Image (spheres, grey):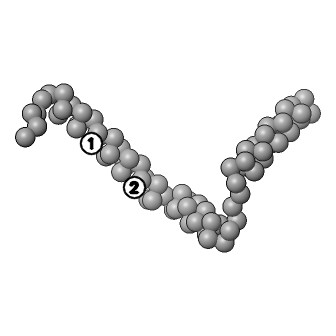
Amino acid sequence: MAEITLETIYKEIKDLKALIDALVETIDILSDPKELKGIREGLMDIKRGRTRSWDEFEQELRREKFSRIQNWDN
């Protein structure tokens, strides 16, 4: 049987707090109709194949950033 120490108890409490925080965050998201709608829309996009690769996404972000920089003075 493993020895129970204050360090072990502290670690378990810390891990439990992180788990509870994650659960509260999940409940908050699922309780917000706007957030839930966005999740459902995203899942439908995936189901319908409306996705892109990470590289495509990254290129789009770079184009948008470059475009904003070019239009900074306009």
Q: Amino acid at mark 1?
A: Leu
Marks 1 and 2, Cα distance to the nearest angstrom? 16 Å
Q: Foreground: 11 or 68?
A: 11
Which residue is pictured at 41% across the width and 49% down the height? 25
User: Could you tell whether 26 is left or right of 6 in the image?
Assistant: right
Q: Residues within 10 Å of mark 1 (few under 14, many from 20)?
A: few
Asked if one can make out residue 41 in the rendered structure from this viewpoint, the answer is no
Q: Which residue is mark 2?
A: 27
Q: Position of residue 13 (x, y in %)?
A: 23, 37
Asked if 45 appears above or below 72 in the picture, the reply is below
Q: Residues within 10 Å of mark 2 (few under 14, many from 20)?
A: few
Helix, strand or loop for disc 2: helix
Q: Residue furthest bottom?
A: 48
Q: Earlier in the sequence, mark 1 or mark 2?
A: 1
Q: Amino acid at mark 2?
A: Ile
Which residue is pictured at 58% across the width and 66% down the height? 43
Asked if one can make out residue 73 in the rendered structure from this viewpoint, the answer is yes
Helix, strand or loop for disc 1: helix
Q: Position of residue 26 (x, y in %)?
A: 42, 53
Which residue is pictured at 35% across the width and 44% down the height? 21
Q: Foreground: 67 or 73?
A: 67
Q: Residue furthest right?
A: 74
Q: Quadrant of the N terminus?
A: top left
Q: Which residue is mark 1?
A: 16
| Front: mark 1 or 2 | 1
User: Could you tell whether 68 is left or right of 6 in the image?
Assistant: right
What number of labels is visible?
Answer: 2
Which residue is pictured at 14% across the width and 28% down the height? 6
- The quarter of the picture where residue 74 lies is top right
Q: Position of residue 33 (x, y in %)?
A: 51, 62
Q: Position of residue 73 (x, y in %)?
A: 90, 29
